[in-house]
Image: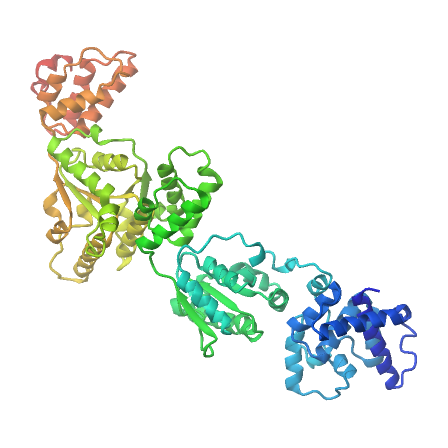
């Protein structure tokens, strides 16, 4: 017989002996299956069973099934009563007639009371009953509402039998919410940063700590895994929301299964994914606070009481640390933002691990991602985008944008520009200044980090550019050209979604815009910026006060910003002087002069446009008020006329389009004098 079968036969034999003690001579007369277990039990089986017990007592290894049985007894810290109860439950599972027999003769089946009787304990204390009931939950489901609880019928959990038979698969009831991290099979990156936090966590659990809370964002579960990797223990990683969904079906069953699994594997438990419903201390909601207290008392306390190491991953500190015992609780707070050196360590580590063709110092300067976001981007790259990429910079930029894109959906739009500085037709002096802007962006990481100037400039590091000028002079095109030259996405802020009538909301929206641009290394572009960055006014009412607060916040945020921000305004005089002092580059655009207008007309007339002879000198000199935007509109309308008639573009098409444009902005009757020598074509 195998070890478990012998164990079953022996507990059945003990039951028979007890029945005889109380005067029942043929207890199994109506239960023949139990007699068969006794009939099959040989002297050799008993000697084998006793030998396994001796091996364990002498610190030697028994045979595998016996080894798992004694390991279970050790893990659950069972005494003789609980061991008898475990044996009764195993026997009842393998031979259900045992439970029926016990109920027939004693009025109660497989229960804690029966185990007490077999150990000659007739009157256990209430305290002892509750302690052993709590222990019994580790191998079977206990309905604590039952009374008296020592008479509650118990059934062994199938996971325990699977374990005794050598199956270490995760309990199926936990599969929807729980993943197992095992040091033996861990495929986990090295901790390129946060080593100090990881060491604190490891020492905490080594010293007997029971509950660790990791707050903040960016790699909380990674740190939890590293802590347990360092103490060489598995970790059950539980999605709290998914777990609570399953709990709604049967709380006791789910909690028992989780504790049981942790004890079997000698693992810790890590919860993550808490919703606002369980953040009462943050929201101030009485209902949320009750939810938090319920989770603390009904879920976390039982786990801690079972001496199972517990990790809570949450956004904010102080969420669940309610009156912990001294030495049992510790809080680890992740930094709100990684330093340049920490970002550099991350990118350098991933470069070496995956043999990436990247410049870690450049990427550390470009992307203000936390550890988790950086890891996800690298994973996305390795799993697909990076395999056939010929432009790593562009590929990583798009992957970062995909990762952080949810914020852009509400505060602005992202574009990738094909426009270059050569496409912008402005004075050469302005182009020279734009080249200075581009060089400043490209060299920022070198002068701040390689030349060690970052500490000397705790604020005011951003490359900020203000472009003022009339509509149509090329301000938006310039922003696109700068982004194109730098190979960076352009993030154009939607001011209608930024400015909010409710107090404090504008600042929150601005913070989302700055954070998004900072994380994704995008060119942050505010068009018609005087609507947001205007002059502060004299405070006459609450509206003036909060409008000024928004401007002050914006000034501070630009100074602390590490990227490039471009602002465009039609009227420079509308801007707050304090704001202008904080801008590194200011460019004043005017309507293009004749040479610039000529260049714009010429740039429109590409080789792909079928055309007759076009008098560019006339077009450039005759219409002095035309901006670049106006010229492009006229040219497009003229092309439409020509194409509609299936003709090559001619001066007639252009003059007619110009006439239509001039009529748009005039309240007086149009005269042909404005068209000069080609008026006859109109």
Above or below, 275 against 144 in this view is: above
Residue 270 lies, in percent from the top left, at 51, 63
Q: Residue 591's image quarter?
A: top left
Horizontal side of 308 relative to 189 (left or right) equals right
Most foreground residue, 436 or 546: 436
Q: Is residue 69 left or right of residue 282?
A: right
Which is more toward the observer, 444 or 482? 444
| Relative image position of residue 331 (x, y in whole percent) | 42, 69
Residue displayed at 78% across by 81% down = 118
Residue 496 in sight in this render: yes
Q: Is residue 179 visible?
A: no
Q: Position of residue 90 (x, y in %)?
A: 76, 69
Quadrant position of the N terminus in the picture: bottom right
- The C terminus is located in which quarter? top left
User: How many marks can you see?
Assistant: 0
Relative height, residue 590 to residue 600 (above, below): below
Residue 514 in the image: state x and y as whole percent: 28, 50
The residue sitting at 24% across, 23% down in the picture is 636
**Residue at 32% across, 46% down:** 361
- Quarter occupied by residue 616: top left
């Amino acid at each position: 017989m195998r070890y478990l079968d012998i164990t079953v036969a022996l507990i059945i034999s003990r039951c028979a002996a007890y029945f005889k003690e109380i005067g029942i001579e043929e207890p199994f007369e109506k239960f023949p299956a139990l007699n068969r277990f006794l009939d099959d039990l040989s002297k050799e089986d008993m000697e084998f069973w006793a030998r396994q017990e001796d091996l364990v007592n002498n610190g030697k290894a028994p045979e595998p099934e016996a080894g798992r049985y004694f390991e279970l007894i050790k893990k659950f810290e069972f005494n003789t009563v609980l061991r008898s109860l475990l044996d009764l439950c195993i026997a009842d599972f393998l031979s259900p007639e045992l439970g029926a027999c016990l109920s027939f003769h004693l009025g109660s089946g497989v229960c804690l009371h029966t185990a007490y009787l077999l150990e000659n304990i007739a009157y256990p204390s209430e305290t002892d009953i509750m302690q052993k009931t709590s222990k019994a939950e580790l191998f079977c489901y206990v309905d604590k509402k039952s009374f008296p609880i020592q008479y509650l019928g118990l059934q062994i959990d199938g996971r325990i039998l699977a374990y005794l038979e050598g199956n270490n698969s995760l309990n199926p009831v936990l599969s929807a919410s729980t993943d197992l991290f095992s040091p033996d099979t861990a495929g986990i990156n090295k901790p390129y940063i946060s080593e100090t936090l990881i060491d604190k966590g490891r020492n905490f659990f080594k010293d007997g700590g029971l509950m660790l809370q990791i707050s903040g964002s960016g790699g909380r579960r990674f740190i939890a895994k590293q802590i347990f990797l360092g103490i060489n223990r598995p970790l059950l990683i539980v999605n709290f929301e998914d777990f609570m969904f399953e709990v709604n079906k049967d709380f006791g069953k789910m909690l028992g299964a989780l504790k049981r699994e942790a004890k079997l594997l000698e693992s810790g438990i890590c919860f993550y994914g808490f919703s606002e419903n369980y953040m009462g201390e943050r929201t101030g909601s009485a209902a949320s606070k009750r939810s938090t207290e319920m989770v603390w008392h009904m879920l976390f306390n039982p786990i801690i009481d079972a001496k199972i190491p517990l990790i809570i991953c949450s956004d904010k500190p102080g969420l669940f640390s309610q009156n912990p015992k001294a030495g049992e609780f510790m809080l680890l707070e992740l930094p709100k933002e990684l330093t340049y050196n920490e970002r550099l360590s991350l990118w350098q580590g991933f470069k070496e691990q995956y043999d990436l063709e990247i410049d870690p110092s450049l990427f550390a300067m470009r992307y203000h991602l936390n550890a988790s976001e950086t890891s996800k981007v690298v994973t996305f790259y390795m799993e697909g985008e990076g395999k056939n990429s010929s432009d790593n910079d562009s590929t990583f930029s798009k992957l970062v944008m995909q990762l952080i894109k949810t914020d852009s959906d509400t505060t602005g739009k992202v574009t990738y520009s094909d426009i270059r500085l050569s496409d912008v037709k402005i004075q050469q002096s302005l182009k020279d200044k734009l080249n200075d802007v581009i060089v400043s962006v490209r060299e920022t990481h070198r002068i701040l980090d390689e030349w060690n100037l970052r500490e000397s400039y705790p604020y005011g590091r951003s490359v900020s550019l203000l472009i003022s000028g009339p509509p149509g002079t090329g301000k938006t095109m310039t922003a696109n050209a700068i982004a194109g030259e730098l190979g960076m996405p352009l993030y154009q802020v939607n001011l209608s979604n930024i400015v909010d009538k409710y107090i404090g909301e504008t600042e929150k929206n601005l913070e989302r815009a700055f954070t998004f641009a900072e994380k994704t290394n995008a060119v942050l572009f505010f068009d018609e910026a005087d609507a947001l960055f205007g002059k502060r006014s004299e405070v006459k009412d609450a509206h003036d006060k909060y409008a000024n607060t928004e401007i002050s916040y914006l000034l501070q945020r630009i100074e602390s910003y590490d990227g490039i921000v471009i602002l465009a305004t039609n009227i420079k005089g509308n801007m707050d002087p304090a704001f202008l002092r904080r801008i590194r580059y200011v460019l004043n655009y005017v309507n293009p002069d004749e040479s610039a207008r000529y260049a714009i007309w010429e740039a429109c007339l590409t080789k792909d446009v079928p055309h007759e002879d076009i008098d560019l000198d006339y077009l450039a000199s005759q219409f002095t008020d035309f901006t670049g935007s106006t010229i492009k509109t006229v040219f497009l309308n003229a092309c439409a006329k020509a194409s509609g008639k299936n003709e090559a573009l001619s001066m007639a098409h252009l003059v007619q389009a110009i006439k239509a444009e001039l009529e748009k902005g005039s309240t007086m009757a149009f005269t042909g004098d404005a068209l000069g020598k080609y008026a006859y074509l109109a």
